[in-house]
Image: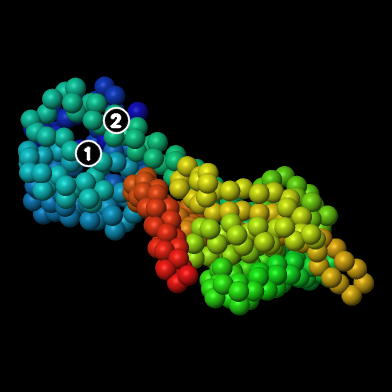
Amino acid sequence: MQKILVVDDVELNRELLRYILEEEYTIEVAADGKEAIQKLQESQGETGAVLLDLQMPRMDGFAVIAALEERGWMQRFPVLVISGEYSMEVENRCLELGVSDFIHKPFGTSIVRNRIRNAMELFATRKKLERKVEEQAEALKEQNQIIQRQAEKLRHEKSFNRLMMEYRSAIMEVETRLKVLNEEFSQEYNRNPFEAIKSRLKTPASIFEKLERKGYPFTLESIRENLTDVAGLRVICSFPDDIYRLAELLTKQDDIIIVRKKDYIKSPKPNGYRSLHFILSVPIFLSDEKKYMNAEVQFRTIAMDFWASLEHKLKYKKYVRSADEIVGMLKDCADSIEALDYQMQEIRNKIDRSRQ
C-alpha cells in the first residue's frame, strides 16, 4: 500500500485520519514540521502523499511547504492541507504554493478518502504526462540534431549549392519583373502598385525537415519535385485591387507558368488568414541553358501582412496563455482588416476621381 504522512500537532486529528485511511494506505504520522521533514528524508521517495496542518509549533505548514519546495519534493508527491481555516485568502495562497487540495476540519470520512484518492490519481497522471512531454522533447531534440547535421553536410555539397543558386535566380527574376511593372505604374499612373517585396530562401535544415515530415526521399530531385516553396516572395501592396492587378500583369507574361493558385482573400481561411498565393514556374537564364524553377509568390496588403506576422508568432510560440481567446481576437481583427482595406481603397478611388 502507498504511504501517507499525516502532519498535525493534535494527536486526536492524527489518529482520526489513521482510522479513516488505514484500510487503503500505510499511515505514518508526525507531530510537527521538523519531524515531518526528517521522516520524509528517511523515507527515500516511498511517500505517496502528505496531509499537512498549517498551524503547528516549531515549524508551521507554510514553512514545511517552503522546505519541500527547496528540496524539490513538491514534485514527488501531492500535498493536501488539513486545516480548520476557511479563509479564501489562505486557500489561494496554499494553492499558489503548489498544494494539490484542501481538506477542512472536522473531517468527513468520504470527503477525506475521495479528496486524497483524486489528488493522488491526478498527481500520478500529471507526472506521466510530464514524462511523456520530456520524452517527446528529447526525441525532438535528437531529431533536430540529425536535421542540423544533415543541413551542415548540405552546405558543403556543390550540387546542393548549385540548386540553391538556381532558386535564388528565380527570386531575382520575379523581383526584377515586379520592379519593372512598378516602374511602369509610377510613370503612367503616378503611383506604385506595391510597397515592398520580401524574399526568402529555405534553409538546408528547413528543407530537410519538410522532406522528412512529408515522407519524401532526401535527394536533389526530390527537392525539385516535391517542394514548391524553397524560393519564396511576399509582395506587400497598399490596396486589394492592386493585388489582383499586379498579379494579373505578372502571371499573364507568356513565359511564366501558373502551377497553382489559391485565393485566400476571396475565400479566407477559417482563422481569418487572407492572401493571394501562387506557385509559379519561372524561367532563369544561365550561362549554358534556360530552365524553369518553382517560386512561391504571396500578395498581401500592408494590414494583411501585419496580421499574418502576429498570427505566425502565436502559431509557433509554445504554451501561450489564453490561446483560444487570442485566436478569436485575431479572427475579429481579420474581419476588421478586410473592411478597412476596402474602405481605404474607396477613399483612394474618390481622391483619384476628384483629380480627373
Q: Residue furthest front?
A: 356
Split into 4 quadrants, where in the image is the N terminus?
A: top left
Residue type for callout 1? Asp
Q: Amino acid at mark 2?
A: Asn
Question: Which residue in the protein does label 2 denote?
Answer: 118
Give the secondary structure at mark 2. Answer: helix
Residue in the picture at 36% in, 49% down: 332
Number of other residues with Cα within 10 Å of mark 2, as a class: few under 14, some 14 to 19, many 20 or more:
few
Q: Mark 2 or mark 1, which has the lower sequence index?
A: 1
Inspect this view and state whether residue 317 appears.
no
Residue name at image x 36 percent, y 46 percent = 328
Total residue callouts: 2
Image side of residue 103 versus residue 258, left or right: left
Residue 214 place in picture, x, y as percent:
69, 45
State the residue at coordinates (28%, 54%): 69
Q: Position of residue 307 (x, y in %)?
A: 44, 58
Q: Give the vertical position of 148 relative to 226 (above or below).
A: below
Q: 40 or 319: nearer the eye? A: 319
Name the image quarter holding residue 345. Answer: bottom left
* 275 relative to 123, above or below: below
Colouring scheme, one of rainbow, by chain, secondary structure, one colour: rainbow
Q: Is residue 260 left or right of residue 277?
A: right
In front of the other: 320 or 336 = 336
Above or below 196: residue 150: above
**Do residues under tags 2 and 1 come within 8 Å of each other at their CB atoms?**
yes
Residue 189 location in percent, x, y? Answer: 56, 72
Q: Which residue is mark 1?
A: 101
